[in-house]
Image (cartoon, grey):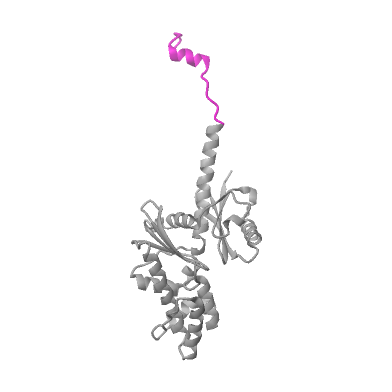
Amino acid sequence: MNEYFAGIDIGSTAVKIVVTDADRQIIGSKTAATGALVFKNAQTAFSSLLDEIGLERKHVSYLTTTGYGRKLFLDADETISEITANAVGAREVGKPFGTIRTIINIGGQDSKGISLDEYGNVTNFAMNDRCAAGTGRFLDMAARNLEIEVDDLGPFHFAAKGIPAAVNATCAVFAESEIIGLLGNGHEREEIVKGIHFSIAKRTIRLVKKVGIEELIYFDGGPALNKGLVAALEDELGRRLVIPAIPQVTTAYGAALIGLESHGYEKREQAKEFAIPVVAEESEVAHACGACSCG
């Protein structure tokens, strides 16, 4: 019988879910809004994903939650830190590219820099969760003020003809006023978008430098889908980033993998506990001690 494992990353703005099989392969993933009813919305999203991939809750052998709302999901078998889950997921996804040593994670309301050793263990991390500037929510706010869709930020970045507009505010509230001021002064939206991306890139790199930047850098979180932001980060770093195909779910995937390992450990411990000693047959004992001559 096939076994399946689920990881649910409950963030401040989005719930990310991954279901894997015993071979560590992702068989389904989903992203949904966290909302105010955290447990209900996460449970609804999880049930919806199971329906989509043709499974029922009983088919999931182990469910692990992570993220700020991890303890609110009452059906979990285990809860873990998002730092650990992100590291495990990035290490697995990044294997085809080499050994991931640095992770840049930009979420809805925080950003993180994580340093790993050569074995994938977390050696240091830094987090900015005091201000929305430099996060996914800041990008949402910027798009709203520029009257464009968030998905259009990338194309607008590459359409900029002039130099990027200077966005210097370190607070999301002041940055919003600054963007409105730039529009009023006649700056093109494309220039402002590019300026926003470079502002976030500079702030993010300052954060990651606190933990150390190694050669192979992995970038995940929803904003990693923004090719303009990726380009700004790569330009500031002077090197390429490893971007997963589904950057929103790396942490959820890591949680699922940790659950897979935990489940395997529990099964091994149960096997030891209930193991029945093998008693040799009488004839085997006789042969072993040479008490008969039939052999």
Q: Residue at x 62, y 48 (%)?
A: 59
Q: Does the magenta-highlighted stretch encompass residue 8?
A: no
Extreme residue in the front direction: 130
Instruction: Classify residue 8 by image quadrant.
Output: bottom right
Q: Is residue 256 left or right of residue 211?
A: right
Secondary structure mostly taken by the magenta-highlighted segment of the chain = loop
The image shows residue 229, relative to residue 284, as above or below, that is: below
Q: Residue at x 49, y 90 (%)?
A: 184
Residue 270: where, in percent of width, then height? Answer: 55, 36
Of residue 131 and residue 13, the one placed in the foreground of this image is 131
Residue 69: where, in percent of width, then height? Answer: 58, 59
Q: Which residues are magenta?
A: 274-295
Q: Is residue 263 left or right of residue 37?
A: left
Instruction: Classify residue 103 by image quadrant.
Output: bottom left
The image shows residue 109, relative to residue 261, as above or below, that is: below
Q: Quadrant of the N terminus?
A: top right
Residue 195: where, in percent of width, then height? Answer: 42, 80
The image shows residue 81, relative to residue 292, as above or below, that is: below
Q: Quadrant of the C terminus?
A: top left
Of residue 40 and residue 100, the one placed in the foreground of this image is 40
Of residue 169 and residue 197, the one placed in the foreground of this image is 169
Residue 290: where, in percent of width, then height? Answer: 43, 11
Marker count (numbered)? 0
Q: Does the magenta-highlighted stretch encompass residue 277?
A: yes
